[in-house]
Image (tube, helix red, strand yellow):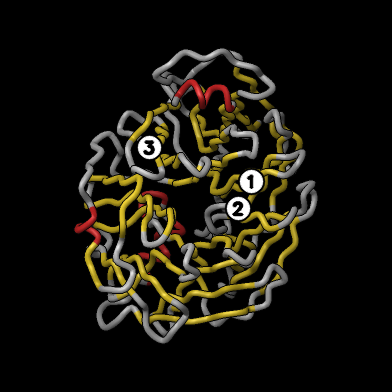
């Protein structure tokens, strides 16, 4: 196991529109260094148990173009506890960690067979177990939690040239399974592989379940990146088409009924809505819903959306100024309430956000030490700070 040293930042190196006082027990910024200056980790998921915070990260492998997997465990104050480097043949973890009961899950694949595996992390973070999934599809693209505590998986089947949606029990049993052809035309396999192997070519794959029980995924359909709604039938119930790889949705959160909070993109422009009705039963275009351009968001920005509570939605992204930005929206009206920025002296990237039951928020991503060494950071914003922001 590679040993990490911990740097506790006791001064504020991020900004907001209001001043705050910091309690190191409830608000902190931690940066995790490594004795190997050449190593680089890219967080992809954030989770927490009663006593631990988990950061799932990718690492470069000498034996494969796909990324290996590391698990960093910290206590609830962000102090480093352990780091586990998972076996090299498990690669390409899906973004995000899915918590069901006291266990966290993610999906990855075998780098040789490309077979997908369901990984489970114990509440202590000391054990990571893998179960092979009985799926013909490979290339797991995204995973999410269903309303009945199962795992929704989006993957790509290169043999059938199809986007595949599956619902899986935590024990690895396949409950539902369907696939949709991407249609006639050129194969998208190169774009899928580049998503895993080239950081600049990552694509906003995601999936989930709406309050009415229907499912959705953002993946390839009709040879374009599309938001597809489905009831696991032979055909989709609705499609919001993008424009090749150049336009579409980046992240989505169901609000209620057919209303969603989302961030979308068209070439280098980004568009945000805190609450907007989307057509889930017709074929439409994503540009029909893009009204509010946010020029500060960077072209290749990673974006995440989380429900802070029933009244507030957080939309997080990355700015042209190499900061992380949190937009707080009123869930009911869709109006912007406040904005909060992370990063002033050093560039910060976004990987994931997590809302705790006590109303605090955790954010993870990467920053740079001495302007050169990319390292994982973990920031916690206390509930009192959130109230000040709002």
Nearer-N-terminus badge (2/3) = 2
Q: Is mark 2 on a helix, strand or loop?
A: loop
Q: Tags 1 and 2 in contact by the CB under 8 Å rule?
A: yes
Name the disc covering residue 47, or none.
1
Q: Which of 301 and 287 is in front in this view?
A: 287
Residue visible at 24% across and 57% down in the picture: 246
Please state the horizontal and vertical placement of residue 330, each as a whole percent of the image.
39, 39
Task: Determine whether, in the image, residue 252 is placed left or right of residue 35.
Answer: left
- Place residue 241 in its image quadrant: bottom left
Q: Which mark is nearer the camera, 1 or 3?
A: 1
Nearer-N-terminus badge (1/3) = 1
Name the disc covering residue 97, or none.
2
Name the disc covering residue 318, or none.
3
Image quarter of the C terminus: top left
Image quarter of the N terminus: top right
Query: Can see residue 37?
Result: no
- Place residue 280 in its image quadrant: bottom left
Query: Does 74 sit above or below residue 226?
Result: above
């Amino acid at each position: 196991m590679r040993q990490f040293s911990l740097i506790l930042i006791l001064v504020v190196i991020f900004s907001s529109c209001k001043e705050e006082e910091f309690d190191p027990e409830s608000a902190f910024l931690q940066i995790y260094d490594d004795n190997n200056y050449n190593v680089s980790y890219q967080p992809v998921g954030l989770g927490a148990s009663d006593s631990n915070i988990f950061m799932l990260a990718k690492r470069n492998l000498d034996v494969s173009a796909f990324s290996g997997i590391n698990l960093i465990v910290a206590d609830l104050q962000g102090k480093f506890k352990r780091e586990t480097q998972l076996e090299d043949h498990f690669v390409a973890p899906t973004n995000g960690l899915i918590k069901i009961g006291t266990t966290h899950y993610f999906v990855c694949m075998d780098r040789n067979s490309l077979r997908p595996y369901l990984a489970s992390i114990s509440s202590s973070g000391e054990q990571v177990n893998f179960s092979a999934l009985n799926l013909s599809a490979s290339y797991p693209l995204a995973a999410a939690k269903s309303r009945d505590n199962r795992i929704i998986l989006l993957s790509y089947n290169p043999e059938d040239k199809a986007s595949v949606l599956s619902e899986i029990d935590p024990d690895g049993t396949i409950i539902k399974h369907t696939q949709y052809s991407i249609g006639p035309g050129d194969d998208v396999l190169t774009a899928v592989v580049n998503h895993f192997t080239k950081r600049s070519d990552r694509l906003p794959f995601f999936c989930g379940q709406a309050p009415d029980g229907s499912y959705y995924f953002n993946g390839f359909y009709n040879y374009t990146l599309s938001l597809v709604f489905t009831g696991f039938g032979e055909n989709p119930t609705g499609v919001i088409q993008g424009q090749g790889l150049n336009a579409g949705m980046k992240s989505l959160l169901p609000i209620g009924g057919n209303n969603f909070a989302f961030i979308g993109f068209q070439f280098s422009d980004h568009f945000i809505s805190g609450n907007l009705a989307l057509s889930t039963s017709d074929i439409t275009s994503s540009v029909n819903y893009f009204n509010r351009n946010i020029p500060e968001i960077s072209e290749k920005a990673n974006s995440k959306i989380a429900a802070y509570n029933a009244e507030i939605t957080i939309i997080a992204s990355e700015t042209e100024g190499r900061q992380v930005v949190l937009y707080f929206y009123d869930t009911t009206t869709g109006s912007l309430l406040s904005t909060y920025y992370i990063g002033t002296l050093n560039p910060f990237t976004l990987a994931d956000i997590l809302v705790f039951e006590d109303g605090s928020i955790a954010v993870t991503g990467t920053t740079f030490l001495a302007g050169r060494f990319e390292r994982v950071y973990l920031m916690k914003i206390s509930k009192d700070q959130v109230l000040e922001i709002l």
